[in-house]
Image (tube, grey):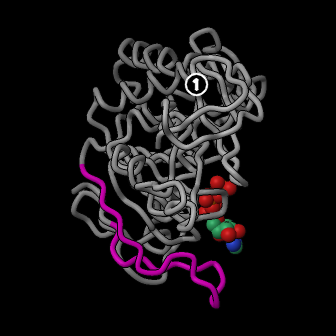
Amino acid sequence: MLLEVKNLYFNYQTDKPLFQNLNLNVDEGQIIALAGESGCGKSTLLSLIYGLMDWQDGQIIFDGEKLFGPKANLVPGESQMKFVAQNYDLMPYATVADNVGKFISNINLKSKKEKVEELLDVVGLTDYAKVLPKNLSGGQQQRVAIARALAVLPKMLLLDEPFSNLDFSRKFELRDKLFNYVKQNNLSLLISTHNLEEVLPWADKIVVLQQGRLIQNDSPKETYENPYNDYVAKLLGEVNIFSDEEKIQFNLSKKHYFPHQIKFSENGVEATVIESLFAGSHYRNKLRINDKSIVVYSQNLLSGNVFLEF
Ligand SMILES: Nc1ncnc2c1ncn2[C@@H]1O[C@H](COP(=O)(O)OP(=O)(O)OP(=O)(O)O)[C@@H](O)[C@H]1O
């Protein structure tokens, strides 16, 4: 076990604890997605693990050693851990390449240069090596900070919403390269996100926080097949949620159906097509069954009435 968070208790305000008895384990080489909506406590948990704030009770154990937070550490942050927070904390008067190389030793300058080049490729910034951070977009600065954190091959990397400022095409490229780099180098990664679709293919475990409470800790497949509640289901993308009465009415085996999980059949439940819109890889259809509105994906444009199988 590389990281153990045991019975963690933390509050910003004395009357309202954010975390009570929070437990979390991360194994060596594991990628853990820390998911939840804005304000659930993701950034706070990462900051506590990195040692930027003191907690009131419980233990954080990293690599077999108990951590004590800033009250015991002169320089916050563990040397074997790197944290990329939402403020990227770059050196403003140093180039992108110098920022990325900040933590790499100068003993072998040739290997340092090669490492910086490799990391700039991982984050797609090869052409920006000589640029100053102030001339970069928010998303580009975020990528410099990620490359800098990877430079020293920490045992554990903490990333706070690392894709939040990236456009769609960049996101795909960076995700692929970043997760491959992490796996190849056997790093442990705790990555926060409010959109699980972004990390699902790579995560070993998904840990969901709701108002500071850890409500689910399962594999991506298990989480997708059995979301603990509506909140978890919604973090996984567009979803149809059925009440207990609707479950009985439509003879359903579960409460949550993602749009692609509802199939068309000759003799299922009858539904009326309200709209059918081209969405690239599929058509996104809004259908109505009695008073219930649902979303179902199809390969063809739909109209009139259809029959559904759940
Ligand atoms: N310095 C602070 N003082 C008091 N309350 C705070 C402070 N920082 C955060 N909080 C509160 O703690 C809760 C958790 O905040 P946190 O930033 O950890 O959430 P988050 O899940 O990371 O959200 P986001 O995705 O928006 O960054 C929120 O209710 C927030 O208002």
- Please, what secondary structure does the residue beneath circle 1 have? strand
Q: Tell me what residue is drawn at x 46 percent, y 56 percent.
A: 251
The residue lying toward the viewer, choosing from 155 and 112, is 155
For disc 1, does the CB lie below 8 Å from ligand 1?
A: no
Q: Tell me what residue is drawn at x 60 percent, y 35 percent.
A: 296
> Dot 1: few (<14), some (14–19), or many (≥20) neighbours within 10 Å?
many
The residue lying toward the viewer, choosing from 250 and 70, is 250
Left or right: 299 in relation to 190:
right
Whether residue 172 appears in magenta in the rendering, the answer is no
- In the rendered image, is residue 203 in sight? yes
Placement of 279 over or under 102, stated as above or below: above
Given the image, on which type of amino acid does mark 1 rest?
Answer: Ser
From the top left corner, tell me how far across and down residue 75 is, in percent. 49, 59
- In the rendered image, is residue 140 in sight? no
From the top left corner, tell me how far across and down residue 201 is, in percent. 40, 33
Whether residue 11 appears in magenta in the rendering, the answer is yes
Left or right: 30 in relation to 84:
left
Q: Tell me what residue is drawn at x 58 percent, y 24 percent.
A: 298
Image quarter where ligand 1 lies:
bottom right
From the top left corner, tell me how far across and down residue 178 is, in percent. 44, 27
The residue lying toward the viewer, choosing from 271 and 52, is 271
Q: Main secondary structure of the magenta part?
A: strand
Question: Magenta segment, which residues?
Answer: 5-27
Residue at the far front in the pictured view: 267
Left or right: 47 in relation to 137:
left
Q: Tell me what residue is drawn at x 26 percent, y 35 percent.
A: 186
Residue of label 1: 298
Placement of 249 over or under 123, stated as above or below: below
From the top left corner, tell me how far across and down residue 4 is, in percent. 30, 64
Q: Quadrant of the N terminus?
A: bottom left
The residue lying toward the viewer, choosing from 273 and 270, is 270
Placement of 210 over or under 9, stated as above or below: above
